[in-house]
Image (cartoon, coloured by chain):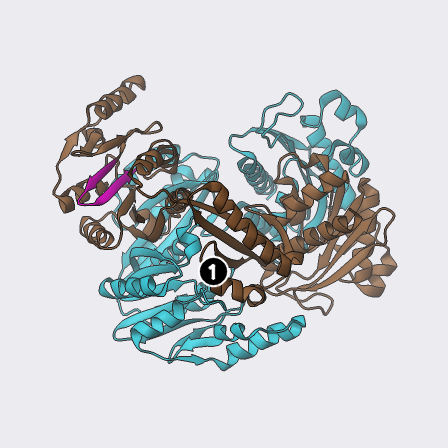
Chain colours: A brown, B cyan
Amino acid sequence: MNAEIIAVGSELLLGQITNTNARFISEKLASIGINVFYHTVVGDNAERLKKAIKIAESRADLIIFSGGLGPTKDDLTKESIAEVLGVKLVFEEEALHSIENYFKKRNRPMTENNKKQALILDGAEVLPNLNGMAPGMILDKDNKTYCLLPGPPSELEPMFTNFGINALLKRLTSTEIIQSRVLRFFGIGEAQLEHDLIDLIDQQTNPTIAPLAGNGEVTIRLTAKSSSLELAEELINETEKEILNRVGQYFYGYGDTTLIKEMGRWLEKSNLTLAAAESLTGGLFQEEVTSISGVSKWFKGGVVTYSADVKEKVLGVKKETIDQYGVVSEQCAREMAENVRELVGADIGVSFTGVAGPASLEGKEPGTVYVGIAMKGKETKVSLLQLFGNRETIRIRSIKNAAWRVIGLLNDVD
Amino acid sequence: MNAEIIAVGSELLLGQITNTNARFISEKLASIGINVFYHTVVGDNAERLKKAIKIAESRADLIIFSGGLGPTKDDLTKESIAEVLGVKLVFEEEALHSIENYFKKRNRPMTENNKKQALILDGAEVLPNLNGMAPGMILDKDNKTYCLLPGPPSELEPMFTNFGINALLKRLTSTEIIQSRVLRFFGIGEAQLEHDLIDLIDQQTNPTIAPLAGNGEVTIRLTAKSSSLELAEELINETEKEILNRVGQYFYGYGDTTLIKEMGRWLEKSNLTLAAAESLTGGLFQEEVTSISGVSKWFKGGVVTYSADVKEKVLGVKKETIDQYGVVSEQCAREMAENVRELVGADIGVSFTGVAGPASLEGKEPGTVYVGIAMKGKETKVSLLQLFGNRETIRIRSIKNAAWRVIGLLNDVD
């Protein structure tokens, strides 16, 4: 069974909102082994919507619609599908009743157009809406399945999770299980990774091997099909083992973890605490750390020393160091890391100093970044990074790099 | 001219990532008066991509592609378009050169597949990629325009903004000018704003008035059509004046400005400097501040005092204050704001202490936040916020609130 998702709404085409529904539905469908071949977005326009339905019918077995089930004149999804399929719209008594109740409870008058929300395609199975008024529905006709969901994610997501998935599972004839796993890598480019794995990728059938690059990282998604979960897992394990044999030194975690989270896991495991001194990153490292709940176990705090005098005043970086070497220097990064560790009373101090751009600083190009890592009883390490990209990219890659180096350090200690 | 956006990438169909590129491109196209009728997403599959291209050609004048320009075998966009159009792919010397340089600078070997990124459609105009390797391009053929952009938003967004829009503007033949302006509000809900402006919204024709809420802010987009820029601006000015007469006290800026940027504008104008002490926000405020280039004029730095002992040790908050009132208290916020101002040597100190959640702290619910603002020669002000939402929402609203209060303070001083 292969699917197409049609999101209906002019606000999507105007760029006012992002099509998060298609992502949500796609992820759910992948988890039950339904392939999605296309997403389509079309505005609140009956003619263009009907054309999109006909195109989808020509290339998909299952068509899932989101949006256009509301009370206003703009809401045309049911009406357009009814017309294309030659199916009537009929009132669903329970939905009508619950819409009337909604207004009664709130002591608000019910305008006539609200009733429209209780119309369903004749013969459709209703998907109850526990978070809004318009019910969803699912209809089989001429070997195609049509599933209609409301637009607001707060209604669509629980409806699809609680009722939609089960309704679809009943229609699946295949006994095939799909299982996938994402491996995350840092410090290797996408092209290099593919080069190192090219024979595996070329032979790939089950599991499939899909590399993806973004934000200075590369991920590999392994997807296996099998008759049982155990068998699928086994297929994935074998391929993962072969991949890690070749590029394991760049691997840092699974699924939607991040370098910062993995760093935290290592720190917690090692029972060590962290402090940070940030110049060009301006608090980004600490912000990412504290966006994780429960970090107080291993994160103490730190400083943002954006101006040179704050480096001296708050962090005690020596005036001579700055005068002699500048703030964008190995020496400054070293003192920052060591001093913030001392000041905050943490086991490890991380520092960032460099040029985020767009302007140069002290004659150094944007992307010149020093990352310092000081640890009690160990020699302080300072790394020079040469990063490319805009201000945001340079800052993000700097903090990822630091997390990667802290993980490396704890790996060595371990 | 009407457009279709085709995003290419199996990761979109698997629900691994959201199609934010389509939203971004759509918004930009709307701003220059190009209608978008469809978005399509298709996987890394040459046959299905070619079919999608043919469908798009049948219904759009302009087709914008995102993704599939990278070095791997999965990247098929250029190749598929070349085939459908019967156009050759040729090496673009400058792009090839810059790819080779990229690897040289990093002292990393360049694998052969990287060269593929320098291929362009024969006759296409190149859109330079300042943040990655694969150039974009734009090609006119048989009365259709094809625009190819890279997938990563960090590359696509600056490329489209800096080069793509201009290349499209040159191709627009319409004499109708569309002009729009976004007004930004803080401290008022969408429902209240709509209530205060309902008669204007109901009568709206030219300009149209479109309110939109998100992230604790409300924006209003005014869009006017006219035969000249001056006339369109005039229509917008009149409506803006009427709107600001009613809800002007909540207005803070135009377009894609932010509260943090506006705060910076006010500080720079007033020739004052800022420091920050962050507890629950963990560096988010300083990170947002330093993501703007050139902030060293008004931002000095600050501290992230995530653990209580760092508040005492680094910031000198009195032990008695914490023992008696707790860290989530007006008293603690006051000392944090005053002490960070002193420590860093800035004119204004801002502090954040509170509960980001999900757990409560000191018996206080998530969303309980104190924001302190200390200014030389003025009484320190501490505000208690009661915010709703998850950890991220609470942190974001806290820093917006602080920026709003600093703006208010400087407005008063002014």
Tell me, yes or no, whether the highlighted magenta stretch contains residue A145. Answer: yes
Along the viewing direction, whichever of A90 and A287 lies nearer the viewer: A90
Q: Chain ID for label 1?
A: A
Answer with left or right where residue A205 lies relative to residue A155: right
In this rendering, is residue B96 above or below B148? Answer: below
Residue A345 in view: yes
Does dot 1 land on a helix, a strand or a loop?
loop
Q: Main secondary structure of the magenta part?
A: strand
Along the viewing direction, whichever of A246 and B263 lies nearer the viewer: A246
Q: Which residues, given as a range, are shown in magenta?
A: A138-149
Percent position of residue A241, x then y: 60, 53
Residue A185's image quarter?
bottom right
Q: Residue at x 23, y 24 (%)?
A: A110
Tell me, yes or no, whether the highlighted magenta stretch contains residue A404. Answer: no
Residue under label 1: A204
Q: Residue at x 58, y 62 (%)?
A: A390
In this rendering, is residue A145 above or below B104? Answer: above
Please name the amino acid that badge 1 sits on: Gln
Residue B228 in view: no
In this rendering, is residue B134 above or below A128? Answer: below
